[in-house]
Image: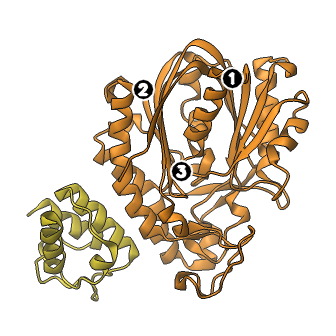
Chain colours: A orange, B yellow
């Protein structure tokens, strides 16, 4: 398989980030009532999720990102008119149109005339978004960019589908990116749409869902998220270990010179296998899927504010990031981050 | 005892001495369910650096069947 495009972006850096979690915590007890204790134990053994957060009815990813963005701007002390762009990376936008980024621009009182657009990506969304935002700064289109990344997958799962209902959690994050002559980041970005049907919400866009076209969807609500876990697992095992190796090579920075390897929090069993397969020391592979579930596009920045906040506030850390999944789509990054004046998790 | 047999014993939560080529994957003591399948794919990847096809693996009924699949995949 062609492993993706290599890109280097010079001239930008991460200036700070804030994650926002919904207050409602959902543990596994309720699922045991619904699916039976034995079934829950079996799923949990694989995915490793003990608890996840869920937005209140009616709340959206944009709401989480609005709260995170407001806190971030306050913490950085950036004048609002110094922000030239806002990008919203999500698969759970407010509307089919307009773009949620436009709404966020107004929510955060950013200046009219600000660049604003949405990007529809999930598991690979954070490194993809960083590449885009840093590229905009390096190319001179913007001095400062807010990169909002998050999902509220709880809004699209079928509560009776244990494979997805127990796995996913909600979170929204905003990362601030600004010009820095010393900033340097290395990315690998790719996609393989042959896997599109393996992780999909079949209905809700403009293409009519044809009942019976895919037997795996028989008897399911086409407006709910469908995941073929086995296929996703195979894709991940095949594509991520080579991506990890190539990322270090492309950056010219050996694995041991990285302070942490941040994997998209897909499921715990898979994460442990990927780390082992790539021969990465487990103490440098943080995970928070036990506490927050698979938070889709938000999982990597959420890891930074939950498990690395102190380290990133304290000094420069070399990070490697690996996002992979829905699309199929994947992206990786190797860059130095910190010291950050603000790197924190809030609740809303 | 090979690392593969040890891993299979762990997946099925049986005593390692139980795992032989004739061991039945779907029986009173073992369940050849989706969890066992993905765990086996990961284990085989670990032990032999070989990726098994999910549907071919699901069709296996004994440990010997899996070993045949591994040998075939390693050649291919």
Report, in whole angstroms, how far the alpha carbon at label 1 lies from the one at label 2: 19 Å
Chain to which mark 1 belongs:
A
Instruction: Please tell me the numbered disc located at residue A259.
Output: 2
- Write down the chain letter for disc 2: A
* A56 on left or right of A20: right
Q: Which mark is residue A342?
A: 1
Total numbered badges shown on the rendered structure: 3
Tag 2 near tag 3, CB within 8 Å: no
Give the labeled residue for mark 3: A289
A255 relative to A275, above or below: above
First of labels 1, 3 by sequence position: 3
How far apart are labels 2 and 3 at the CA level? 20 Å
* Residue B61: assigned label: none
Is A236 drawn above or below residue A310 in the view shown?
below
Q: Earlier in the sequence, mark 2 or mark 3?
A: 2
Which residue sits furthest top? A181
- Give the quarter of the image for residue A299: top right
Which residue of the protein is positioned furthest toward the left in this rendering? B1
**In the visual, does A162 lie left or right of A221?**
left
């Amino acid at each position: 398989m062609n492993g993706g495009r290599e890109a280097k972006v010079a001239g930008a850096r991460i200036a700070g980030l804030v994650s926002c979690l919904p207050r409602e915590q959902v543990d596994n007890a309720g699922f045991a009532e619904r699916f039976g204790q034995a079934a829950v134990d079996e799923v949990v053994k694989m995915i490793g999720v003990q608890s996840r957060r869920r937005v209140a009815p009616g709340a959206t990813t944009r709401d989480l990102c609005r709260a995170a963005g407001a806190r971030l701007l306050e913490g950085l002390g950036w004048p609002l008119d110094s922000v030239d762009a806002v990008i919203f990376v999500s698969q759970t936008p407010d509307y089919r149109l307009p773009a949620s980024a436009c709404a966020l621009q107004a929510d955060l009182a950013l200046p009219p005339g600000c660049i604003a657009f949405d990007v529809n990506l999930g598991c690979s969304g954070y490194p993809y978004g960083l590449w885009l935002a840093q590229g905009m700064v390096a190319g001179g289109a913007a001095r400062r960019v807010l990169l909002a990344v998050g999902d509220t997958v709880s809004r699209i799962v079928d509560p009776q589908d244990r494979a997805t209902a127990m796995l996913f959690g909600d979170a929204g994050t905003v990362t601030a990116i600004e010009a820095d002559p010393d900033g340097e980041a290395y990315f690998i970005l790719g996609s393989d749409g042959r896997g599109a049907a393996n992780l999909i919400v079949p209905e809700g866009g403009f293409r009519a869902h044809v009942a019976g076209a895919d037997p795996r969807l028989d008897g399911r609500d086409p407006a709910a998220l469908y995941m073929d876990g086995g296929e996703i697992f195979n894709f991940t095992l095949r594509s991520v270990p080579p991506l990890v190796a190539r990322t270090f090579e492309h950056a010219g920075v050996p694995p041991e010179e990285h302070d942490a390897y941040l994997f998209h929090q897909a499921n715990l069993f898979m994460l442990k296998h990927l780390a082992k397969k790539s021969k990465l020391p487990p103490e440098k592979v943080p995970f928070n899927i036990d506490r927050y579930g698979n938070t889709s596009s938000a999982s990597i920045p959420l890891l930074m504010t939950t498990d690395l906040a102190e380290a990133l506030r304290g000094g420069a850390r070399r990070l490697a990031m690996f996002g992979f999944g829905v699309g199929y789509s994947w992206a990786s990054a190797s860059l130095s981050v910190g010291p950050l004046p603000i790197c924190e998790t809030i609740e809303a | 005892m090979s690392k593969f047999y040890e891993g299979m014993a762990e997946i099925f939560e049986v005593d390692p001495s139980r795992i032989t080529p004739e061991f039945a994957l779907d029986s009173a003591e073992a369940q050849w369910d989706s969890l066992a399948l993905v765990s086996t794919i990961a284990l085989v990847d670990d032990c032999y650096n070989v990726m098994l096809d999910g549907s071919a693996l699901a069709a296996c009924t004994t440990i010997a069947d899996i070993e045949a699949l591994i040998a075939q995949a390693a050649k291919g």
